[in-house]
Image: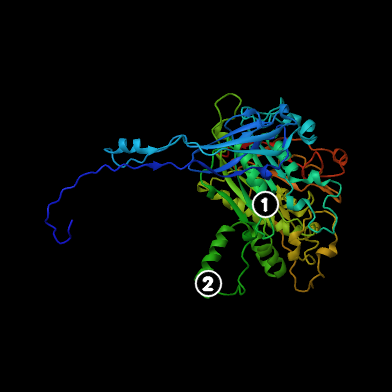
Amino acid sequence: QDEGNLNTTTTSSLFDIPLQVEHCNPTLLSVKTFENFESRIFVGVPVVVEVDIVYANHVIIDWYVNKTTKVCSDSHMYIPTSQDIGKQLSIWIKPVTIETPITILSTCIEKQMRSSIHEGDGEGFEEAYEFRHVVEPLPSMPVVSPLRQGWITTPGCQTTKKGGDDIDTTPSSLRVVSYNVLADQNAYSRDESSDSVYPYCPNNFLDRARRMPMIVYELLAYQPDIICLQEVDTISFDTLLRPVLCANGYQGYYSVKQVDSSNEGCATFWSLECFERIQDEKEMNDFPIRDLFPPLPPVDEGKSGADMSSCDNKNQKANQEENTGWQSLHELSHFLSKHPHLQETVQKTLGHVLQLVTLTLKKAPNHGNTIDASQRPPKLVVANTHLFFHNWAGHIRVMQLLVSCHKLDLYRRTQDGGKKYPFVFCGDFNSAVVSGGVRLLLQRSVPPTHGRTWKHLHSFQWRKEEQEEKQDDGAASSPSSNMTVPISNDKLQSPPTLALPDTFPTLCSGYRDLPPFTHYIQGFVGTLDYILASESSSEEPFGFRPKRWAPMPSARQVKQYVALPNEGMPSDHLCLVCDLEYTFSNNK
């Protein structure tokens, strides 16, 4: 229409313009599996392939042995059987578009537009991949079988829960696993001139491509409701643990240590048969433990409120509210202010993380062998961590545990208006049974006279280069290589009593009698790993108590292989497995 002739009457008509709309072929962008098809393939261990696609909404993955015999159709996962032993596994992949949506421009032209689109057959280019190793029998794993035969079920089977004649299958209990799986970066010496970390274990048994599938088998064999893992490699989580466990009915997340040189961290998984799926990943929390320490007191505590800045006043008030009842945090703050090197270490250098997640239990089926739904908590909290390793740093670990317990308590009290849900606290605490850390958790306080805790307070100095080393609590190492000249003690403050407040629930161990060891290497044998849970009381309506715990191998059984890890035990730690029974305290 002519801009200058606004009054001109015009007519318009709809013209039919034929268009040929081409459909892009479904395309594979990437194909991923553990170790890029170089992993060992064992009978009973699921193999999962993940693909990224474009212009497609489905991928067909068919599985073959010896290239010709199809053994599984249209599945991302295959579990090799004994009939596959000695045969080569391969996959055939084809991206497809099952249904092409049509954008409706207007009702009057929809039919005509639909007839003008060239959809093709909705199939993309096919690709085939072959795994390098043939299918092998699962290596003998004496801890899993025969030692824990009564605790296992067939991996990958989702119709049976917690197999074994003597195992309770009712939802009155919760099965929990905690396992330090030995990060690959810690399995080998970084210095070629030094001895191997595990000289008694051949490198082929240390190979991640062999060890990790064995660990996956063990995890699935127990069919736990909650899995807490430590020393998880980022690549093992992304390409093995997450894909395989998610394909077998779990959900989970991963938190890497907050250290530049680290590629490992903690992972927590939960069974979707037992718990509701978490829709928002923001609800899967992790907290750097160094951020959980209380702020240092003001330089001049004699200042009046008027002299302090408004921001300082607000922060101090917020910290006081959060720390109500936690007198030890106040004392710890003052203590660290007198020990600048220690304060630098725990609040700035160390990168350990605490995972916290709230899980909603699914409603129990209505049959006679379940407990009353009112006696089960609607939700529970899971905590998972891996603490500082150094064998002369017991004082640091007890501080890490104190602030972790405070965060755990604060976290659960802010859920759903302060419901005080019960919790399970798992991890490699790198703390022996007689350590200050375990004393804090189970006996609730550590006095300044506890020699094992404070013995090296004035002599331990953490050096940056030690971030590249690994040494568990209590293991033999040369003190001179890890210590500096002791600091002058003249101006150093004596340690405070560290204690859990009365408002924090009593903790019980999933193993009623703590095992003699969970970590067994040359130079050190002891318990470092724990499954703890909150107990019910007059102030805590819901809690747990230990119901049964999986047997642990004897020292004699481990000595047959010299130590851990070995050909049949894939980590330098043992897997803890226990059933926790729900308890209810009616305080009305």
Residue 241 numbered tag:
none
Q: Nearer the viewer, residue 200 or 102?
A: 102
The residue under the point 72% across, 26% down is 83
At label 2, which amino acid type do we have? Gly
Quadrant for the C terminus, please: top right
User: Between residues 426 and 570, which one lies in front from this camera angle?
Assistant: 570
Q: Residue at x 78, y 48 (%)?
A: 433
Label number found at residue 305 = 2
Three-letter amino acid code at the position of disc 1: Gly
As drawn, 293 above or below 99? below
Q: Position of residue 379 (x, y in %)?
A: 56, 41
**As displayed, is residue 416 above or below residue 70?**
below
**Would you name the residue on which mark 1 appears?**
265
Q: Classify the position of the N terminus by image quarter.
A: bottom left
Q: Nearer the viewer, residue 315 or 98?
A: 98
Task: Inspect this view and state whether residue 534 appears.
Answer: no
Instruction: Tell me, yes or no, if residue 250 can be seen here.
Output: yes
| Cα–Cα gap, marks 2 and 1 | 42 Å
Q: Residues within 10 Å of mark 2 (few under 14, many from 20)?
A: few
The residue shown at (80%, 43%) is 205
Mark 1 secondary-structure assignment: strand
